Image (tube, rainbow, N blue to C red):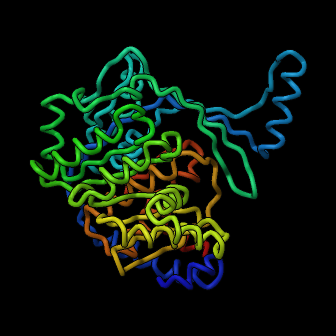
Amino acid sequence: MRWNDIMQLRGASLNHLSQKTEKLLNHLRNLSPRSFTVAVMPDFFLDRLVSWNSTLKEFSTRISKVASQKGGSIDNVTQMDLIGGNAINTASALAALGAEVSPIVCTNKLGLRLLELHLQRLGIDLSHVKINDKASITTALEFTQDGENRNVMLRDLGSLAKLHPRDLSEKDFTLLKDADYVCVFNWAGTQTHGTEIAKRVFSFVKAEGTGKTYYDTADPLPKRQKIPELIEEVLCSRNLIDILSLNENEALTYAKYLAPEQFKELRKSHKPTPILAKKCAEILSHQLPSRIDLHTTSFSATFKKDESTAAPTFETKTLRATGAGDAWNAGNIYADANHFPDDLRLIFSNAVAAYYLSSPLGKHPTLEQLRKFLQAIIRES
């Protein structure tokens, strides 16, 4: 798909998407899924999603009113307890698709019990979970702003904050050596040693293993003072990262640090964030050695130096604002492992994310459920 199609995402390009969706369905019908193993690390959060089905302004007004009355309750606020964290969400989505997944994460005894309850039925290997005193906990506030779903995550990082490469066991390194994909997430959440963890894990895999390395730093701004170190020692290092996955804000952040003058000019001429993110991802593809995979609310794209491919997202009813990027990453890894062409890989990833966002229970799809989801989209188009 050409970039001018992206500029008209909800016009002519939807017809293009419908054609590509049919092509993807045919591809899935003929697919003999490859067996592959994935190691994901290092974050697992006990999540509570608080869905405020209105604007941030109204949310603030209601909170202020209750506080001014010296406290009280706001009833009928939809809430859901989930297991979360980038690594665990991606593991869950990958396992649903049929991948063999082993998370290397830290939590407390309650966290382990919840992982067993939710993930063992998917065949996920929990033998690398590390038990510490303090779990990582997130309360995600979801509301609408500018016509879009937004989230603000209130995080207690727990033992994740000080996780160190030396906390990895010999058994963990054997897993990293043998895995087909080694995925590291949430650089900011590993507050003290995030850069060291990425360097140690990826350099080990490149020296001793044969798998691909996949990095999604998540929002780096909570550790903005350490971003230059991350860029210099990890992102710019040759032969460390095969695939760098970014959302809109992450693409803007890294482009701003790597090419400040270009970024400044882009900000003057490009207002819509998804299009600005695309321009920033193009910059990164020339500055960094890894493949750049970008996912936004409007489209996803992949960049390999002077080559790029893009695909619009699906129009579905969005029931949540949290976890879409993790579902997208799972689809991206699965499609990459099964050697999908770039255009179908992106549409597949978009479909995995769309299924999750529109699922009333926040479930990740199996391959068969995804096929039926795509068939329904084609019927309605």
339 and 98: which one is in front? 339
Residue drawn at (46%, 31%) of the image? 45
In the displayed structure, 126 sits above or below 267; it is above
Query: From the viewer's perspective, is 317 left or right of 96?
Result: right
Residue drawn at (29%, 39%) of the image? 196
In the displayed structure, 145 sits above or below 86; it is below
In the displayed structure, 376 sits above or below 247; it is below
Residue drawn at (37%, 60%) of the image? 332
Is residue 371 visible from the viewing direction of this image?
A: no
183 and 250: which one is in front? 250
Is residue 140 visible from the viewing direction of this image?
A: yes
Residue 197, x across and y down, in percent: 29, 38
Residue 302, x across and y down, in percent: 40, 70
Residue 335, x across and y down, in percent: 32, 63
Q: How many marks?
A: 0
Residue 36, x across and y down, in percent: 20, 53
> Which residue is situated farthest in the left direction here?
208
223 and 315: which one is in front? 223
> Which residue is situated farthest in the front direction here?
261
Quadrant of residue 163 within the rendered picture: top left
